Amino acid sequence: MPRTPIVAGNWKMHTTVPEALALVEVMRSALEPITTVERVVCPPFVALWPLHERLRGTSIRLGAQNVYSEEKGAYTGEISPLMLAGVVDYVIIGHSERRHLFGESDELIGRKVRAALAHGLQPILCVGETLAENEAGATEAVVRRQLESGLAEVESLEHVVLAYEPVWAIGTGRPATPEGANAVMGRLRELIAVRYGAAAAEAMRILYGGSVTPENFPSFMAMPEIDGGLVGGASLKADSFVALVRQAAATT
Ligand code: 13P
């Protein structure tokens, strides 16, 4: 069974609510007919509900950029999986900006993944090494640790998506090479096979993220282990996001 590609736009801390609505309005008619690719937009939290309403009845999916691990309680400023259930399909967990700017631990990320799944949300679990780790030859050890802790309490991978985002490639205009990313993702798939079996590994979608543009994306999509993109900057312009989705569709 071929894996359905996913192109997910991580809007990060960009767009006011009116800007988010305007952006999705421009993309919507172009994205709607491309049904061989899952198209996901991940705006800031405050835009989720208005976009949920605007995208109701379409096949364009919504994702959140983060979630907390608890259902409710005295956690000022946090958003719970209970609040996101029924509003979004996906949630990005363990993005490198969460890990490195906000000090999220492997252990917390594992709890978030478990909480998301318990509420019917599909985690997009991000892993990736820093430049120093890469230069020290530690890429495999780092992504393995992040994978194992992220999935520590996960029994079935049916609703999990992985994203390999080398930290040094994010927002730098310096993407990984398609071959290099493919090799790391192949290794991730092998690790998954050991723990969850060959069928689960074969079915797992693994996205590449880090300076994806319409200029470089076709060569990533041509790689056997790469099932789509988790896109930052290029997802904030309707033209480039639609172009990326079309490129992914051309591989199906
Ligand atoms: P850029 O595409 O802007 O490099 O961001 C990648 C990313 O972090 C997506 O989550």
Image: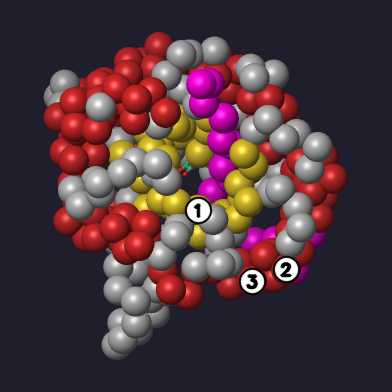
12 magenta-colored:
yes
Q: Amino acid at mark 1?
A: Tyr
Element under disc 2? helix
Per the model, the C-alpha gap separating discs 1 and 2 is 16 Å
Query: Count the marks: how many?
Result: 3
Residue 166 against residue 125 in the figure, above or below: above
Q: Quadrant of residue 199?
A: top left
Q: Write the residue at 52% across / 26% down.
A: 3
Element under disc 1? strand
Tell me the number on the disc at residue 49: 3
Residue 50 pos. (x, y %): 69, 70
Q: Nearer the viewer, residue 148 or 237?
A: 148
Tell me the number on the disc at residue 90: 1
Residue 184 against residue 235 in the figure, above or below: above
Range shown magenta: 1-22
Marks 2,3: beta carbons within 8 A: yes
Residue 176 pos. (x, y %): 41, 22
For label 2, the residue is 53
Q: Amino acid at mark 2?
A: Glu
Q: Write the residue at 20% across / 52% down.
A: 153
User: Extreme bottom residue here?
Assistant: 74
Q: Amino acid at mark 3?
A: Trp
Mark 3 Cα shell of 10 Å, populated few (<14), some (14-19), many (≥20): some
Closer to the N terminus: mark 3 or mark 1? 3
Q: Write the residue at 69% across / 19% down.
A: 250
Q: Quadrant of the C terminus?
A: top right
Element under disc 3? helix
Q: Write the residue at 51% across / 59% down.
A: 64
Residue 89 pos. (x, y %): 54, 56
Closer to the N terminus: mark 1 or mark 2? 2
